[in-house]
Image (tube, helix red, strand yellow):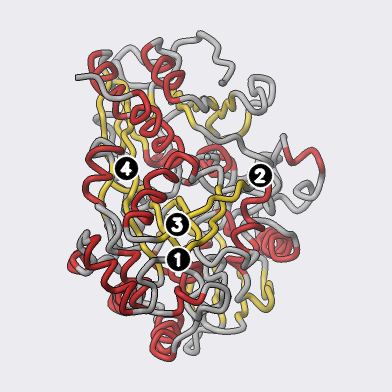
């Protein structure tokens, strides 16, 4: 039976939001290349988001990462299981107090200009990111200084231990730019990097298609089996599916409604259950702006308002996962037992609100953001069912960040790409965290955050992050509702290697069938 048009549109929007959280293209009709053996000689990939700039200080994470991560080296590499490996830094070590990180830079690397990559280039890039407003700057907030004892050594001194720093150095804050050119205006569209590919500026059309040519002298060639990578920006899910079926791309994400047709066209589908999440942040936990949110019973009642599994089944058509928690289900902080804490219970939620002094509920204004519009009717209805009346205030796309951070809204809906346990903790639970808008603190949480920041062994830190997760769920700091899944389609000869453990968008997620791809 055909799905209602409204639900179909909502699902397509959900897929788009998930990929944008992790971002009508002009497509030429050149087929994606294959070799005589059938294995792909070129990867032709569609993404949703356009890279805003190739200035190392202005890089945006999400699907744009597929482009810039191919051009720049990062100090560390994050594999498809989320495990860190040597990158441009062939080794690293912390001081005993965790306040000094020593990086040994791999020898023999060169920028595409031919200049050597050394400690001075690393220092110059880190200093530029630290001093320039941009998405990466916050990740280096714990850094007090960067020193270069010799051309192969970088010493990063910290204000306090920061367990999230190593993971950050495998993403945009860890890129290495060419000191001679990275501050030039030309770098925004014509970057000089030391990564596995160079940007073919003659074949590239900014905002539409980015063509990458493999460097034959790159140190980690096995991790990048494709000689050419063509990345097309296609913002419409239907157009993306049509590009796959027409042979214009040989890999891309697809709306679940398109899966049968894509399979029939000879593509393999790889499903990743969780790449982003829909989280209702109950930010005013002290009740300074909205008194009701200062009562734990109210926050628990809000969590009980959502029939999470029904939303996943009906709206997302199973392309997602119900959740009561914030962290990546593939990560160490995730605890399946926490999903039993807030069963869907309208009657119970109303009872809690009445006990807290709100028998008739209350009203709240929340920001209507570009990523939340398709989900707002679900949240409006669920909250209305327990007596919470929501008014959505439109926010222009360019004001999204400032609106959320302003403190104007006591609660707000986020559709957020998943990150490592350390990064999610820093963003949502630390007093300075970008998503902890009202700077909430708690003695127990403060102690746990201190333990997590000092514990640099991932095997040991997982338990601490589970305790932080448990605290957040039990104290109802948020009302997480569902994860958004992603379906990748790949043509014969190409394999998708990710499983959601790492949500970093990198060409290393793709391999050639039958190859022994390695190197992180």
Q: Residue at label 1?
A: 362
Q: Is residue 112 left or right of residue 224?
A: right
Whether 164 is drawn above or below 269: the answer is below
CA distance for labels 2 and 3? 23 Å
Please give the residue where the numbered disc 2 appears in the rendered image: 396
Dividing the picture into quadrants, the one containing residue 279 is bottom left
Q: Residue at x 53, y 61 (%)?
A: 169
Callout 1–callout 3 Cβ contact below 8 Å: yes
Residue linked to disc 4: 485
Crowdedness of circle 3 by 10 Å Cα count: few (<14), some, many (20+)?
A: some
Q: Quadrant of residue 376?
A: top left
Nearer to me, 15 or 393: 393
Q: Residues within 10 Å of mark 1 (few under 14, many from 20)?
A: some
Circle nearer the N terminus (3, 4): 3
Question: Which residue is drawn at the image coordinates 45% and 35% (left, top)?
Answer: 16
58 or 334: nearer the viewer:
334
Q: Nearer the viewer, residue 292 or 431?
A: 292
Residue at numbered disc 3? 389
SS category of the residue bearing label 1: strand
């Amino acid at each position: 039976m055909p799905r209602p048009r409204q639900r179909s549109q909502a699902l397509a929007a959900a897929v788009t939001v998930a990929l944008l959280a992790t971002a009508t293209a002009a497509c030429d009709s050149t087929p994606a290349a294959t070799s005589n053996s059938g294995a792909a000689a070129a990867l032709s990939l569609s993404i949703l988001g356009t890279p805003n700039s190739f200035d190392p200080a202005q890089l945006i994470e999400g699907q744009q990462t597929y482009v810039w991560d191919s051009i720049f080296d990062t100090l560390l590499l994050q594999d498809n299981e989320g495990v860190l490996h040597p990158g441009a830094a062939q080794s690293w070590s912390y001081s005993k107090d965790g306040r000094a990180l020593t990086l040994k830079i791999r020898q023999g690397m060169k920028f595409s200009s031919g200049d050597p990559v050394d400690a001075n280039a690393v220092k110059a890039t880190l200093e530029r990111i630290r001093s320039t407003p941009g998405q990466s700057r916050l990740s280096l907030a714990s850094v007090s200084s960067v020193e270069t004892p010799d051309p192969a050594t970088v010493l990063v001194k910290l204000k306090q231990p920061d367990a999230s720093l190593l993971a950050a150095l495998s993403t945009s804050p860890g890129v290495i730019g060419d000191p001679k050119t990275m501050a030039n205006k030309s770098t925004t569209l014509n970057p000089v990097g030391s990564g596995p590919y160079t940007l073919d500026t003659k074949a590239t059309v900014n905002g539409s298609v980015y063509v990458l040519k493999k460097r034959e002298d790159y140190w980690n060639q096995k991790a990048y089996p494709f000689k050419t990578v063509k990345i097309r920006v296609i913002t419409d899910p239907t157009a993306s599916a049509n590009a796959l079926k027409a042979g214009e791309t040989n890999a891309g994400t697809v709306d679940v409604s398109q899966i049968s047709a894509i399979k029939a066209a000879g593509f393999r589908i790889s499903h990743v259950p969780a790449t982003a999440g829909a989280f209702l942040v109950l930010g005013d936990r002290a009740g300074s702006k909205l008194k009701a949110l200062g009562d734990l019973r109210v926050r628990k009642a809000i969590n009980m308002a959502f029939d999470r599994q029904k939303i996943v089944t009906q709206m997302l058509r199973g392309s997602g996962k119900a959740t009561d928690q914030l962290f990546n289900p593939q990560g160490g902080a995730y605890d399946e037992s926490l999903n039993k804490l807030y069963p869907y219970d309208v009657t119970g939620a109303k009872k809690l609100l009445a006990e807290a002094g709100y028998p008739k509920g209350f009203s709240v204004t929340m920001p209507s953001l570009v990523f939340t519009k398709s989900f707002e009717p679900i949240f409006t209805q669920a909250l209305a069912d327990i007596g919470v009346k929501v008014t959505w205030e439109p926010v222009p796309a360019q004001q999204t960040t400032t609106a959320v951070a302003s403190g104007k809204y006591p609660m707000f809906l986020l559709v957020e790409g998943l990150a490592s346990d350390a990064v999610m903790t820093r963003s949502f639970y630390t007093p300075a965290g970008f998503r902890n808008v009202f700077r909430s603190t708690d003695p127990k949480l403060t102690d746990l955050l201190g333990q997590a920041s000092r514990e640099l062994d991932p095997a040991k830190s997982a338990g601490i992050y589970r305790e932080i997760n448990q605290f957040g769920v039990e104290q109802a700091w948020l009302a997480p509702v569902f994860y958004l899944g992603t379906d990748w389609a790949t043509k014969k000869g190409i394999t998708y290697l990710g499983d959601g453990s790492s949500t970093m968008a990198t060409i290393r997620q793709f391999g050639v069938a039958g190859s022994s791809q390695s190197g992180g």
